[in-house]
Amino acid sequence: MNVRSIAHVMGTLLLVTGVAMLFPAVCSLLYGDEGDLAAILLSAAVALAVGLPLWWRFRREQRLELNDAFAIAVFGWIAVSAVSALPFIIHGSIRSFTDAFFEMMSGYTTTGATILTDI
């Protein structure tokens, strides 16, 4: 298992997630919702702060094998869902990390399951 290559791909996934969080931040800014804006920007900063060093440090590692792909799939889903759950926690709209993680994993997998009762 090539841990350095896995770290590079994980960094890339976190960078993409952090940049993708900037789109809802722009929408929040346009609609004047500063409470959501702060939570989204802080979460994007966390994703970028973790992803950029991983991506930069291991950028020359390009050799992946099949078992590396399985590790990336497992840890990628977990990391991206965990980082994406942060705005819910920071904003306070979902108080439990477990519930926020479930909500994001459900959103990414498009299962349609939710813990929210008043949407």
Image (tube, grey):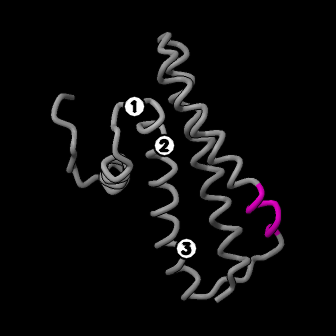
Q: Residues within 10 Å of mark 2 (few under 14, many from 20)?
A: many
Q: Which mark is residue 45?
A: none
Where's residue 41, x and y in %? Answer: 60, 31
Q: Main secondary structure of the magenta part?
A: helix
Q: Is residue 14 magenta?
A: no
Residue 22 picture quarter: top right
Rendered location of residue 28, percent (x, y): 50, 20
Disc sitting over residue 92 in the figure: 1
Secondary-structure class at tag 2: helix
Q: Amino acid at mark 2?
A: Leu
Q: Is residue 12 left or right of residue 27?
A: right
Please name the residue that numbered disc 2 is placed on. 86
Where disc 1 sits, the SS reads loop
Front position among marks 3 and 2: 2
Q: Secondary structure at mark 3?
A: helix
**Mark 3 or 2, nearer chain start:** 3
Single out the residue that lies furthest toward the front: 95
Verify whether residue 54 appears in magenta: yes
Q: Nearer the viewer, mark 2 or mark 1?
A: 1
**Is residue 72 shown above or below 77?**
below
Residue in view at x 68 percent, y 54 percent? 50
- Quarter-of-image position of residue 111: bottom left
Q: CA distance from mark 1 to mark 3?
A: 30 Å
Type of the residue with mark 3 = Ile
For the C terminus, the image quarter is top left
Q: Is the residue 75 above or below the residue 101 in the image?
A: below
Q: Tell me where residue 46 appears, x and y as whole percent.
A: 63, 45
* Residue linked to disc 3: 72
Q: Which residues are magenta?
A: 53-59
